[in-house]
Amino acid sequence: MKRLFTLPVFLAFCFPLLTFAQNKNGSIHVPDTLAAPYIKIAGVECTGNKLTKPPIIIRELDFKIGDSLATFQKEKKVNFNDRIFYPGDSSELRLRMNYSRENLINTKLFLTVDLSLKKITENQYTLVIDVVERHYWWLFPVAKLNAPNFNEWLRDINWADLSMGLFFSHNNLWGLSHQSSIVGYIGKSWAIGFGYRIPWIGSGKKVGLTMTAGYQNLYTVEYASVDNKRQMLYDYNSSQNMKIGAKLSLRPGLYNYGTIKLTGEYIHVSDSLVKLDSNYLAGYKTTNTSLTLYADYYYDTRNSHTYPLKGNMLRVFMEKIGLGVVSKDIDLFYYGIDFHFYQTVGRKWYIAEMVKAENAAGENSPYYYQMNMTQGKDFIRGFDLYTVKGDQMYFCRNNVKFELIKPSVTKVKEGQEKNKFKKLQYAFYLNAFADAGYCVNNFTDVNPYNNRLLMSWGLGIDFVTYYDLVIRFEYAFTSMGTNGFFFGFGMPI
């Protein structure tokens, strides 16, 4: 289903920030000096987890109960648990406690995580993990734009273009990190979707399962592009599709992940749409039925999955649309690689880069199935008002960040420290960015932005807060001579 714009979350967190700050999302507490060169973690004590079961917490530790960890700095390069530490790094104890805390934050179950040590003997300690759990029940309104995208809607606001609905979810059922959700909206477009995620199945605790189902009936459909401007059809029942999916999430190592996903889709488009673009679906038809197999593997050491400042992520992926089992309507194959790099370069200064290359092995893809370099997570900044689609795309995004306001939590009255809604976590980062991209389309000559190098640069401010919300405010210039102010949602890199 298309991405939904969640109005209440956006409005609730934008402005109430002028207040004194406390700590961010937790920290580690280790004595300045420890008598023994190695200490043994003899046990783990979890506090603050009113719902979450202890095994869910313990499995994220970067070490095992019973391990002995060095309390001094290593003199040579050492590989600990898939991470390489160099001379001058902190002690193994501090590093592993810090990575364990980051892993727990990345479960998206907790607002804050604090790790400390409780002494048993001179060389034996209990690890104490104190957490503040997130609010797990959510019920709020959502809005689906019957417009090409949010930035185009802002330039000609029409409230009649909103389809309204509700989103409901629970993100920690049974205290086992099970997630369930239901979303629906009505209006010119309408839809309903369900999802259920089990973090792992089986005794090995390395395989998770997610099941989804959804139906969508769209009023607004992009059916073609001319001069890289979206050609839109505005008509009831323009496109209807139903999807059912099952996904296996693999985690063979603490920082190693994989995905295998099978999706069945049925799509039907109106006769009006086919008259506008007979090649919108495969076979010049009004319906397509397909099975899609997607698989990826990625290595991820980012300190935060929401807004990373340190670490790397490398992903390789493939997708086969049309397996020839249910039907032979479509037969496409996509593959690619995605690399992200984050590093601290000074006090309050950070750099981030990402490179992605994706290719399609086949002939002219129908418009519905073509890759899009201006949609979702595939974009270069400044081209929000255009569509750049084809059968190959290569792009990079680059940021230099400055921490304007460090990650902080607003102060609350005494006795309300554990209230999940009284405190607001926030941070602001100033960005200087430069992006570049190239989209190959050898089957049309009406789009001048295809088959040429596109570049953009500019400045932006990122607002980061609780519950994985990142709002971007950016002013971009492009190599095509355009410029403008844009909103974005989600981390830029």
Image: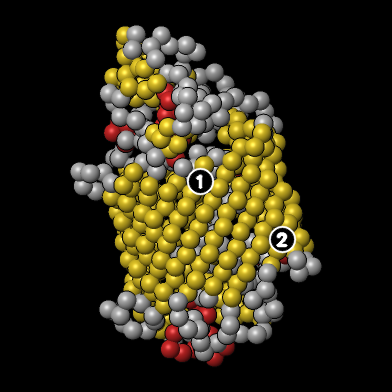
Q: Looking at numbered disc 2 in the image, what kind of residue is underneath it?
A: Ser
Q: Which residue ends up furthest to the front in the rendered image?
A: 76
Vertical order, 354 against 280 (above or below):
above
* Res. 156 mark: none
Q: How many marks?
A: 2
Q: Secondary structure at mark 2?
A: strand
Image position, residue 397 (x, y; %): 63, 56
Q: Secondary structure at mark 1?
A: strand
* Res. 312 mark: 1
Q: Looking at numbered disc 1 in the image, what kind of residue is underneath it?
A: Asn
> Which residue is rendered at x = 32% and y = 19% of the image?
40
Vertical order, 224 against 296 (above or below):
below
Q: Which residue is mark 2?
A: 456
Q: Nearer the viewer, mark 1 or mark 2?
A: 1
> Which residue is rendered at x = 57% and y = 44% of the image?
342
Quadrant of the image occupied by residue 20: top right
